Image (cartoon, grey):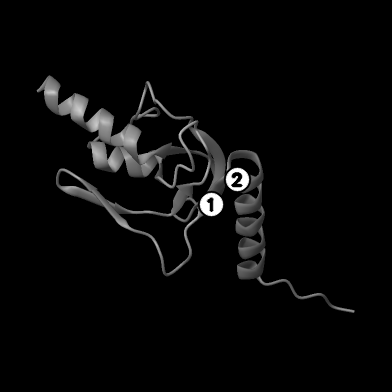
Amino acid sequence: MTISININDLIATRLTEIARDAWQAHRVMPVSDCGGRVLDLGTAAVREFWYCQADHGTGICGEPMLTSDQANSLLGMYSVDEPVPDPQLPIVEVELLDEGLGGFFPGSLIHFSDVRHEFQKTQEDR
């Protein structure tokens, strides 16, 4: 008996597991394939892939969450491990698919409001 495993099926299964774990542990959900807002700061823009459904004490958040790479892109920093050093809302650690490196790697999701706040701080410092 031969068992055939499709790499796309394995990736899809792992993405589903990551989404389930992110929901159960942090109340964070991935955006559906056809959804996702375009989020911009200054002259840069990224697409929303995750959003927060946690209650941080003021009701359901509903805010977009960005990967560290996306936050770095919006902030104009491309080699910083921690783009938002003092976030107001919790950073969520998840595994993310890095297509450039060809695998799943630990990553961080940062609330868009924290990225905006950091952007405003850098603009004021100039």
First reached walking from the N terminus: tag 2 or tag 1: 2
Which residue, as the protein is rendered here, is positioned at the far bottom?
A: 1
Q: Nearer the viewer, residue 107 or 19?
A: 19
Residue position marked by numbered label 2 in the rendering: 22
Split into 4 quadrants, where in the image is the N terminus?
Answer: bottom right
- Pointer 2: residues within 10 angstroms few (<14), some, or many (20+)? many
Q: Would residue 12 be visible to someone looking at this image?
A: yes
Q: Nearer the viewer, residue 10 or 123?
A: 123
Which residue is depicted at the point 28% across and 42% down? 73
Which residue is depicted at the point 40% across and 45% down? 63
Which residue is depicted at the point 13% across and 20% down? 125
- Pointer 1: residues within 10 angstroms few (<14), some, or many (20+)? many
Measuring from the top left, give residue 82's x and y in whole percent.
39, 27
Residue position marked by numbered label 1 in the rendering: 29
Residue 98 higher or lower than 123, as above or below: below
Which residue, as the protein is rendered here, is positioned at the far front?
A: 58
Q: CA distance from mark 2 to mark 1?
A: 7 Å
Q: Tell me the amino acid under the disc marked 1.
A: Met
Residue 40 higher or lower than 4, as above or below: above
Q: Nearer the viewer, residue 125 or 6?
A: 125
Residue 106 location, quadrant: top right
* CB contact under 8 Å: marks 2 and 1: yes
Q: Would residue 78 be visible to someone looking at this image?
A: no
Measuring from the top left, give residue 104's x and y in whole percent.
57, 49
Horizontal side of residue 4 vs 32, given as left or right: right
- Secondary structure at badge 1 equals strand
Residue 14 location, quadrant: bottom right
Which mark is on residue 4?
none
Measuring from the top left, give residue 120's x and y in whole percent.
19, 30
